[in-house]
Image: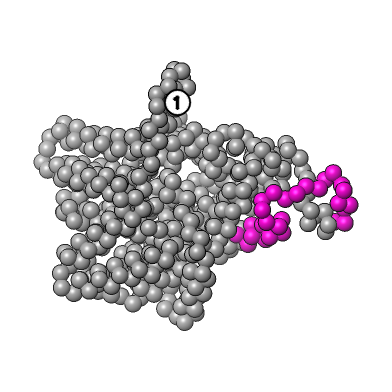
Amino acid sequence: MIFNSFEFIFLFLPIVLFIYFLLNKWAFTLAKLWLLSSSLFFYGWWNPSYLPLIIVSLIVNFLIGAALGKKLSIYHKKWTLTAGIIFNVSLLGYFKYYDFFVENLNVLFDESIPLKNLLLPLAISFYTFQQIAYLVDSYRGETREYNFLDYSLFVTFFPQLIAGPIVHHKEVMGQFRNETNRTFQPHHFALGLLIFSIGLFKKVAIADTFSIWANRGYSIAENLTFIDGWMTALAYTFQLYFDFSGYSDMAIGAALLFNIHLPKNFFSPYKALNIQDFWRRWHITLSSFLTRYVYIPLGGNRKGPARTYIHILIVFFVSGFWHGAGWTFIVWGLLHGVASVIYRAWNQAGLSMNKWLAWFITFNFVNISWVFFRSPDFETAIHVLKSMAGLNGFFLPKEVIEALNIPLGSPVLFNFNLGSPFIEVLLYLIAAGLITLLARNSIEWKDNFQPKKWNAFYASILFLYSVMQLQQVTEFLYFNF
């Protein structure tokens, strides 16, 4: 089940919400059991065959976490934690990376090991990282007060289960125990509807529109020229932003209906003035996880500049590989790692740059690096990058030719290839750029929210327009990661 569907909006969410607050009047534990079972139903709706997998993962990780919370020797604690991490990484590795490793082994050693073509279990990347963090914190003695019900609800809570945010146990588990959160709160309900409506509009009205042009462009990558090459890249850059940030908004909004505050995951990342600033704004919970559980344990910046740069590259290698089982994702991650190293060296040297130039360089680096993230293979990525570099020609669309009164027989003419008029795509790109740079983001709406008629009207317009577009239901991009 996905957020942008009639089943979720008009059946699942209202029923779960109503019964949850009804049960809270009599039995809080029963209400939590209802929410847990509803979350598991939500997960199993997509593919019931993987429901046992997440249940087994919950049981094993809770038992390991409980063992880590006991008075064990340091030696036994380390081995227990290691076993837990190996369990989680092996689970993720088998389902997500088995075919990737086999393909590379076949190429390297001229073997013919058969592929399994496994269907990636939904959300396995997210709940694996979430539970690894829990085990590490159990090792540190920070999780002793939790029971299995609280733990299971923390992992499976349906607003954040499928594609994040990657929630830390300290951020939400206490909220499920808070007595004030057991009663219906109109303020949270109104705020949740507003944030959910903003996210829904981002997804169905903006991201899904850009997906048409991005998919079209990448499907004919070898035929792109300069202008449609850049428009293809920018279409995906905005599709990914509005798709993922839209999902995060819907997750935060849906959770607020239950009086649960999820952490922010986006904060206008395309306003960033450097690559470090970008990662403080983009997929914030993933950046926080990698910093807390990879970068700092490696030594962070405490072991000299050279080691610091190596640690940064390792973190971004992990980030790239986490996103997808392919070399294009690894290259994308390492590109960001190299850019982060360059920025860190630049910053420590005391150098500065005009902020508009800094923004221009940062945005275009992000835009160009997304080409590797989106491309199914290096050949496609190279075709798109060649077109963006002008190596396939600088031809002009028909609309520009006519506006400049150039004869239509001119050799500078080409047919715009993205399936819509050039002017329409251009206006959408300009509008998306202005929204990401000038409009208030959803977190700012949330932090400054007041239950006024204008906010209700604004949310209603976004919601009604979005609902009318639900006939063509599409997946979220991060479901694939």
State the residue in front, 105 or 280: 105
Q: Residue at x 30, y 75 (%)?
A: 185
Q: Depth check: give the residue in front, 184 or 116.
A: 116
Q: Residue at x 63, y 46 (%)?
A: 217
Residue under label 1, please give it.
104
Q: Is mark 1 on a helix, strand or loop?
A: helix
Residue at 38 percent of width and 65 percent of height: 7
Whether residue 338 is situated above or below residue 468 in the rendered picture: above
- Side (left or right) of 35 relative to 365: left
* Outermost residue toward the left in this view: 71
Q: In this view, does 175 lie above or below 138?
A: below
Could you tell me which quadrant the C terminus lies in? top left
User: In the image, which residues are magenta?
Assistant: 404-432
Residue 333 to residue 460: above or below = above
Where does residue 445 sit, x and y in percent of width and height?
Answer: 46, 68
Residue 238 % position (x, y):
57, 54
**Three-letter amino acid code at the position of disc 1:** Asn
**Residue 475 is covered by the magenta coloring:** no
Colour scheme employed for the rendering of this structure:
one colour
Can residue 73 be spotted in the picture?
Answer: yes
Q: Where is residue 310 in the image (x, y as percent from the top left)?
A: 44, 31
Residue 79 % position (x, y):
19, 32
Q: Which residue lies furthest to the bottom in this view?
A: 453
Residue 235 relative to residue 30: left or right: right
Query: Which corner quadrant of the image does residue 394 belong to?
Result: top right
Image point (49%, 73%), residue name: 464
Which quarter of the rendering shows the N terminus? bottom left
Does residue 200 appear to the left or right of 22 in the view shown? right
